[in-house]
Image (tube, helix red, strand yellow):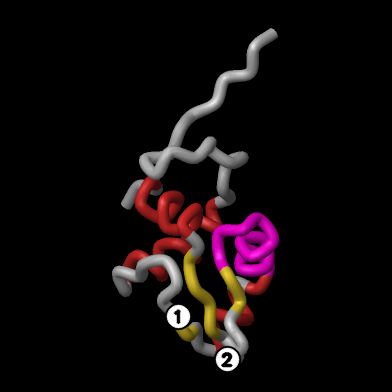
Amino acid sequence: MAQHTETFSHGGVAPPELSAEEHSVLKIFRTYQMTPGKMLCLNGAQLDHYRRPIASLVRRGFLVAEAYRGGFSLTPDGYAAMNDIDG
């Protein structure tokens, strides 16, 4: 049986679905109109609240943890996923 895959606007194959919490994290990046490689510093409350989805997004290659505590940047795949989510 053939496997169906979707293609992101950047040409990559769609990853497994993102959780609602992962969407929430990516929406923070969208609020600040972040692009790949630009660092966004999350505050302590955001880091505590979104610890798991942030770790998941880093593990899955959507975010890069920067050397600065609380600093993260989007990868090209993270940027594409951010732009593909609703609202």
5 shown above or below 54: above
Where is residue 73 shown, x and y percent of the image? 49, 73
Quadrant occupied by the N terminus: top right
User: How many neighbours does mark 2 have within 10 angstroms: few (below 14), some (14-19), or many (20 or more)?
Assistant: few
**Which quadrant of the view contains residue 61?**
bottom right
**Relative depth, front residue between 27 and 11:** 11
Where is residue 34 shown, x and y percent of the image? 35, 70
Magenta residues?
52-63
User: How many neighbours does mark 1 have within 10 angstroms: few (below 14), some (14-19), or many (20 or more)?
Assistant: some
Residue 68 image label? 2
Q: Image point 50% across, 83% down: which residue? A: 42
Please give left or right for residue 9 compared with residue 50 in the image: left
23 shown above or below 2: below
Please tell me whether mark 1 sits on a helix, a strand or a loop: strand
Where is residue 66 shown, x and y percent of the image? 58, 82
| Sooner in the amino-acid sequence: mark 2 or mark 1 | 1
Query: Is 16 inside the magenta-drawn segment?
Result: no
Q: Is the C-beta separation of discs 2 and 1 under 8 Å? A: yes
Residue type of the residue flagged with mark 2: Tyr
Q: Image point 50% across, 62% down: which residue? A: 75
Residue 59 image label? none
**Residue denoted by label 1:** 39
Residue type of the residue flagged with mark 1: Met
Q: Image point 63% across, 18% down: which residue? A: 3
12 shown above or below 52: above
65 shown above or below 53: below
Magenta: main secondary structure: helix
Where is residue 65 shown, x and y percent of the image? 61, 76
Please give left or right for residue 59 compared with residue 28 in the image: right
**Which quadrant of the view contains residue 48?**
bottom right
- Number of numbered discs: 2
